[in-house]
Image (spheres, rainbow, N blue to C red):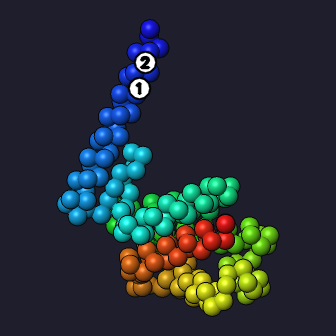
Amino acid sequence: MFETIGNSTREDAQERSKNFQNALNEFFVDEGIGWQMIEGEIITRGTETFESNIQSAVQALEAAGRDTARDEIHEALTDLSRRPEADLTGAVQHAMAALECVARDVCGDERATLGEIVKQYPGIIPKPLDDSVSKAWGYASEMARHIREGRKPERNEVELIVGLSATVATYLSR
């Protein structure tokens, strides 16, 4: 009998938590607040397309057993969610790290950078899309990895890099 009560209480608490999360997320949307609660954690909310893209990437990376890359995508979202100010350069670094990690794994080249992989393994990313990945790598290098005083990426640019990295990592994982 005690076990039944314990399970019932646990299930009730989970249901209340789920209801609270749904109500809070509804409030955030209604008020135009750019946050959401996912599994008890407050994180940034992007456009529906951005959210779907990131969720698909996380699922694809997890299904492919690429936990490190999945965790890097999660860290990019965490950086976008930092308060009071997002860590935009951190989000770019983590997103590109996820993509580089997957590309290294797919090529079997543990030491190559993403830029080298695009050059040395033609066809891993179809032409001319490989140019956009190479340019994104250059952007990340310039704006997030080797930054200069006074230069900061814009949030919409960062979301583009995070989304692009997630999409290409998903493509490579499949």
- Residue 36 percent across, percent down from the top left: 34, 55
Mark 1 sits on what residue? Answer: 10
Q: Tag on residue 51?
A: none
**Residue 86 visible in the current orientation:** no
Q: Quadrant of residue 17?
A: top left
How dense is the environment of label 1, judged by Cα within 10 Å: few (below 14), some, or many (20 and up)? few
**CA distance for labels 1 and 2:** 6 Å
SS for callout 1? helix
Point 44% across, 21% down: residue:
7
Quadrant into which the N terminus falls: top left
Point 66% across, 89% down: residue:
127
- Residue 68 percent across, percent down from the top left: 64, 58
In this picture, residue 154 sits left or right of residue 114: left
133 or 141, nearer to the observer: 133
- Disc 2 residue type? Gly
How dense is the environment of label 2, judged by Cα within 10 Å: few (below 14), some, or many (20 and up)? few
- Disc 1 residue type? Arg
Point 61% across, 86% down: residue:
129
- Residue 139 percent across, percent down from the top left: 53, 85
In this picture, residue 85 sits left or right of residue 30: right
Point 42% across, 64% down: residue:
51
Q: Quadrant of residue 153?
A: bottom left
**Residue 51 visible in the current orientation:** yes
Disc 1 vs disc 2: Cβ atoms closer than 8 Å? yes
Q: Tag on residue 6?
A: 2
SS for callout 2? helix
- Residue 25 percent across, percent down from the top left: 29, 52
